[in-house]
Amino acid sequence: MYIVATTLALVFITSTLAVDYVLHPDKDKDFDGIAVTTLKKAHNCDRRTKKGDRLKVHFNATMPDGKLIESTWLRKNAFEFVIGEAMVINGFEYGLADMCIGEIRHLMIPPKYAYGEWQLGSTVPARVTFHFTVELIDFSSDALKRKTNLFKTIDVNDDGLLSPDEVKRYLGNEQLEGNPNKMTSLLRDIFKQDDLDSDGYINHKEFGGYKHDEL
């Protein structure tokens, strides 16, 4: 049973929850508690991932006890993000730098590089160490030329404010269809985190995702 859709769990609300870090991992080494282990090496590697690249990956995310909380393999829908744009939790981004297409890694990410003191709904408690098994499917080097202003994408009426209905529309997918309780919990968590003035809307300043067009 998945806790949330991938777009929420790793993209929308998490970029503001983890501390800053240096994006220079050593493979198979711990970086202040982050363990990056290569499970499968690539046969050929013309270039490795770096800051600014758009990555396409498949992953399983599990709790320390092995409980599966998300899998793009099961959903048959690869996940994409750009290294260096704060689109994902810091530990996930850090663990996939300097990676080759076809490579599979295991990431062990402690709370301070994931969700910290923040609880994800009613399923995942605060201060959890996450485990990811990740395969790099593809990546491109021109990602910075194709940045998307996520705030404008969600703000469909272009009033400079994100309403619960707009966020709900953006998050809607097959994992949440027919499960109003999960969506309600999801929206409550998002607005608790990002609606700093508690006015029922998320403004441009409060928004934690990517919100600029310029490089």
Image (tube, rainbow, N blue to C red):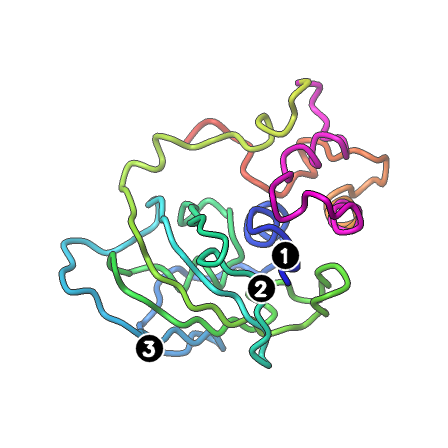
Using a 10 Å C-alpha cutoff, classify the residue at mark 1 as few (fewer than 14 neighbours), some (14 to 19) or many (20 or more). many
Tag 2, which secondary structure?
loop
- The residue type indicated by label 2 comes to Ala
At horizontal 47% and vertical 68% (from top left) the residue drawn is 132
Which of the 4 quarters of the picture holds residue 3?
bottom right
Residue beneath label 1, please? Answer: 17
The residue range painted magenta reads: 158-187
As displayed, is residue 107 above or below residue 97?
below
Q: Quadrant of residue 93?
A: bottom left
Q: Is residue 168 magenta?
A: yes
Q: Is residue 164 above or below residue 97?
A: above
Q: Quadrant of the N terminus?
A: bottom right
Task: Give the residue pinned by disc 2.
Answer: 114
Task: Report how far apart the C-alphas of labels 1 and 3 lie in the structure.
Answer: 25 Å
Residue 75 rendering spot, x and y as whole percentages: 50, 53
- Residue for badge 3: 28
Give the alpha-carbon distance from disc 3 to disc 2, as whole Å.
19 Å
Q: Label 3 is placed on what type of residue?
A: Asp
Q: Is residue 52 left or right of residue 120?
A: left
Q: Cβ–Cβ below 8 Å for labels 1 and 2? A: yes
